[in-house]
Image (cartoon, helix red, strand yellow):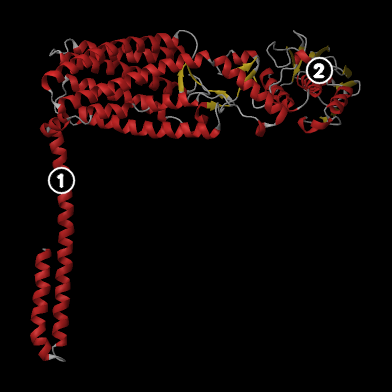
Amino acid sequence: MGSFDVNGRCEVIDPMSPCNTTIPPNTLIYLNSTETQQSVTEQAIFYINLLVFTDLNCSIAGLQFFCTNFYRPCSIVNTPSRQIAFPSLPCRSLCDSTYNICIKYSNKFPTSCNATSDGLESFPNNETTYVLTPSQAGQDKNVSIACNNEYKASNNSVQLCRSPLIYVDQETSRSRSKYYTVTDNCAIPCPFYIWSKSIDNSLYYIQTVLTSISFICSIFLILIYGVIQDKISIKMEVILSFAIGTMMFELSYLMTNKGNTLYCSDNRYKVTSDAICAINGFLFQFGANATIFWYTAICYDFFLSMRLKKFTYFKYVRIGLWTLAFLFAAIPLMGRVYVSSPVNRGCFLSGSGVWQYLFTYIPLWICLAMITLFLAYLIYKIHAMNQVLNDAKVLVYNAKQVFIMIWILFTFVFVTVFKFYSDSRESYYYSKIADWVNCIAQNGESRCLLGIGDYQFKMIQIASTCSVGFFGFLAFGLEPSVLYSLRKSRRFNALRALIGNSISRDRTSSSSGSSSQMKRASQRASTSTATNTTSSSTITASASPSSLESAVSDSSQVQ
């Protein structure tokens, strides 16, 4: 006999609990005053997941034991003053049986069959007797509650996940939290290395280096075409807008870390409700759309230049492109569809539904079609011009522009192809993960390789998308016209004069310091010569003046 929680209560078991195939539906379970079904479920999932390291018989017995221990049946007793809820504790026979079956795995169980709590046996032989006082029940009364061993688990009810997979109940998997399930309730943990840790780290370093270079190149383009120009022409603004888009795109790639743990939380993958995922997803989507929209505008401007026409209605194009880029990033943010994944770093549009097609791929395909038409026309015109002019410099300049256009066109085409390729192999990836997990359970992790492959395609995708800013700088930052416009820029000349004056002052200060040192050296030499005159008058008479003249001459040269 012992104490109990007079504020305990009964609740119908959640049908989505990990014991939903072991405990009959609509069973009343006991919760003390500090427990919730969520907290009980979290404890149950933790210990049930430990059973993945055991054999099938132990898994069945262990599941029955943990479900009985955490989801205790509830009995309501009527007293003169109130109704009081009592738990039915697991029977001692159930605990002993489970320990005998799982003797090899006894370290997986949280307690001993001889344990007590608040003066009560945690695993009674037959029943538990509770003593009620008048203050609790309005009278003295003893209440006996039979122990429980009625829950039954079978092969079909064992919902275990082999390590490293984690168990996720159906309600959690359908919630805003993001899990990638391999089988029914077994999900990939976060973080997870789709390839190997060494390959993942290599991809991270390649992405970081290329993105950093491209980010710096984008900053240079913004400075060249925006900050230090006195007047920004339409061509300059188009390139400036492209550079702003690539800068934001690359910034989203820089918001990652090795292992991608930045986008993990308690084994789940972060979603839009997590601030860092929302920010990263918005930056990526806005930057990617702005980049492709404004690069299409650059190609169109180049197309007009070849035809000796002006970019009419540019002010409307400017408003339209920036508005579309913003809306195509803001609407998914409001729809809360930015998610992280085990394949990519950072957050992107959810891989299912119309979101990706509506706000990424359909606009991308329209722009790619336009770029392809402009590119075909430009190649035709460049070939025709070369036949007439036969100027090597003009040919090299135009060939450079065409090459970079082809490279950026390839980048966005490859993104599309890689997306459909990955989607077509999704079931294959999950089956390979399931096979790998089964191999680990039988042979140990050291003898099993995941072996998904295809990381070469991922490396090409990283190399192409993360270098857009760099190739943009090669195309537009090294033009002869850039140097000409900089020479004509008052801002640039003022900045150059300011830097030149600063360097000049530093040199003057350094020269003045050296002159002072030489003067002090000359004075010391003169004093030393005068001192030596007494002991060596002949040598002093002939040598001292010349030494002094030499020192003064050296000092004058330095000055």
Which corner quadrant holds the N terminus? top right
| Residue depicted at x 31% and y 27% | 469
The tally of labels here is: 2
Disc 2 marks a residue whose amino acid type is Phe
Point out residue 8 in the picture as x, y percentages from the top left corner: 75, 19
Q: N-terminal of the two: label 1 or label 2?
A: 2
Q: Nearer the viewer, residue 525 or 15?
A: 525
- In the picture, measured across the screen, residue 134 lies left or right of residue 311, that is right
Is disc 2 placed on a helix, strand or loop?
strand
Q: Nearer the viewer, residue 303 or 393?
A: 393
Res. 357 image quadrant:
top left
Mark 1 — residue? 500
- In the picture, measured across the screen, residue 353 lies left or right of residue 506, that is right
The span from disc 1 to disc 2 (Cα, nearest Å) is 86 Å
| Residue depicted at x 14% and y 75% | 523
Check contact, mark 1 vs mark 2: CB within 8 A. no
Is disc 1 placed on a helix, strand or loop?
helix
Disc 1 marks a residue whose amino acid type is Gly
Point out residue 5 in the picture as x, y percentages from the top left corner: 77, 22
Which corner quadrant holds the C terminus? bottom left
Q: Nearer the viewer, residue 281 or 295?
A: 295
Category of crowding for the residue at label 1, using alpha-carbon neighbours closer than 10 angstroms: few (below 14), some (14–19), many (at least 20):
few
Q: Nearer the viewer, residue 365 or 7?
A: 365
**Can residue 206 be seen by looking at this rendering?**
yes
Point out residue 60 in the picture as x, y percentages from the top left corner: 79, 20
Mark 2 — residue? 86
| Residue depicted at x 48% and y 15% | 421
Category of crowding for the residue at label 2, using alpha-carbon neighbours closer than 10 angstroms: few (below 14), some (14–19), many (at least 20):
many
Res. 318 image quadrant:
top left
In front: mark 1 or mark 2?
1
- In the picture, measured across the screen, residue 424 lies left or right of residue 295, that is right
Point out residue 486 in the picture as x, y percentages from the top left corner: 15, 32
